[in-house]
Image (cartoon, rainbow, N blue to C red):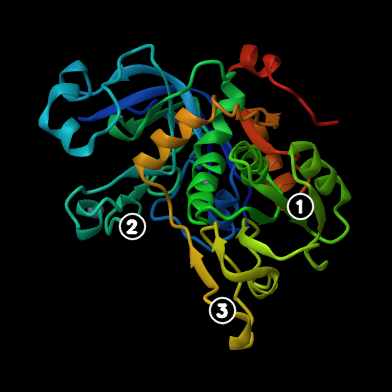
Amino acid sequence: MRAMLFERTGEPLRLADVPIPEPRAGQVRIKVEACGVCRTDLHIIDGELPPHKRPLILGHQIVGVVDKAGPEADGDVAGGAEASTFAGTAALKVGDRVGVPWLGWTDGTCRYCRSGRENLCDHARFTGYDIDGGFAEYAVADHRFAFPIPGGYPVPQAAPLLCAGLIGWRSLSMTGDAERLGLYGYGAAAHIITQVARYQGRRVFAFTRPGDTTSQGFAREMGAEWAGDTATAAPEPLDAAIIFAPAGDLVPLALKAVAKGGAVVCGGIHMSDIPSFPYEDLWGEREIRSVANLTRQDGREFLALAPEVPVHTEVELFRLEEAGEALDRLRSGRVRGAAVIALDTAEAQGGRHLRE
Ligand SMILES: [Zn+2]
Ligand SMILES: [Zn+2]
């Protein structure tokens, strides 16, 4: 099969012909139709999150069709003890369209897994990081960590739901019932979460890179009532802020923007160092917290909610061999919404192609 391989930091991804993976016990093989591109992929290739295997196939927002099931991944599993333990997805069968997120496997036995916090599992394995991901024609996944794709979503538009959507949703959940919500960094996650937040009756304030009026316009289109530069003060105090950009210097800025009792939620997996700031800025029961990974419960909640809103994802499509270009555009903030690798050309034509 064709796959884009990451081999070394500083080197471009390489298109290669590699063997089609075989699903092992509990796994399904998926014929990949689309795979979203995420900032985490940049952190991996840039050496900020060195992968545990090389060469590595990146990509952890996979949408595709099950084409083969491994030994224990057939219909028997749904009624088994394991399924009830995990309260996981129904058993998958060949032909099902599924989505595979970042969380690819957990041990199910550690302190975190046993307390409903599998996102913090000591031995978690992640898609497109510990496990080969979706920048390829086929991928294998543990059937318990694959979600049915909600009906009505064209394939490319569904892909960003699986990380930008899920991590965004988990981040939004950490803000409680905050009404005035600030979003710092306006990319794939922010454009999805703006729609969800508006649906919930919240007010959204979007902060972009200084001078990025294109993203500010995009944020307003998505439902933000105000959009401006990160360097600009918010028009009124915020009840919470979510930082999706990987810039630590946004933390003290966001902290200054939130009212007493407000939370600053860091939604990314990696961030540059956070500059020091006076304790006074944290005083008043303000809090700073990170969001790590996702649980399958997040996935079930969000994928049920997305069609209700309904969340519409803006995507820019790239061919498999253009994965490097997609990453470059993401790095320089030139993607409107989400970048998605589309492997199925019929679906790709049905999507919105926004690149000049
Ligand atoms: Zn991601
Ligand atoms: Zn665990």
> What kind of element bears circle 2?
helix
- Residue indicated by mark 1: 332
> What kind of element bears circle 3?
loop
Give the residue displayed 54% in from the left and 34% down from the top.
161
Give the residue displayed 57% in from the left and 43% down from the top.
164
Nearest the viewer among 136 and 64 is: 64
Mark 2 or 1 closer to N-term? 2
Q: Quick check: can you spot residue 325?
A: yes
Mark 2 against mark 1, which lies toward the viewer? Answer: 2
Mark 3 or 2 closer to N-term? 2
Is the Cβ of the residue at disc 2 closer than 8 Å to that at disc 1? no
**274, above or below 118, in the image:** below
Label 3 Cα crowd, 10 Å radius (few <14 / some 14-19 / many 20+)? few
Residue 70: image quadrant is top left
Mark 1 or 3 closer to N-term? 3
Q: CA distance from mark 1 to mark 3?
A: 36 Å
Q: CA distance from mark 2 to mark 1?
A: 30 Å
- Residue indicated by mark 3: 284
- Residue indicated by mark 2: 120
Distance from mark 2 CB to nearest ligand 2 atom below 8 Å: yes
Give the residue displayed 60% in from the left and 53% down from the top.
42
Given the image, on which type of amino acid does mark 3 rest? Gly
Q: CA distance from mark 3 to mark 2?
A: 29 Å
Label 2 Cα crowd, 10 Å radius (few <14 / some 14-19 / many 20+)? some
**194, above or below 349, in the image:** below
Q: Is residue 205 left or right of residue 274?
A: right
Q: Residue 26: x and y, percent?
A: 22, 30
Residue 138: image quadrant is top left
Given the image, on which type of amino acid does mark 1 rest? Ser
**233, above or below 39, in the image:** below
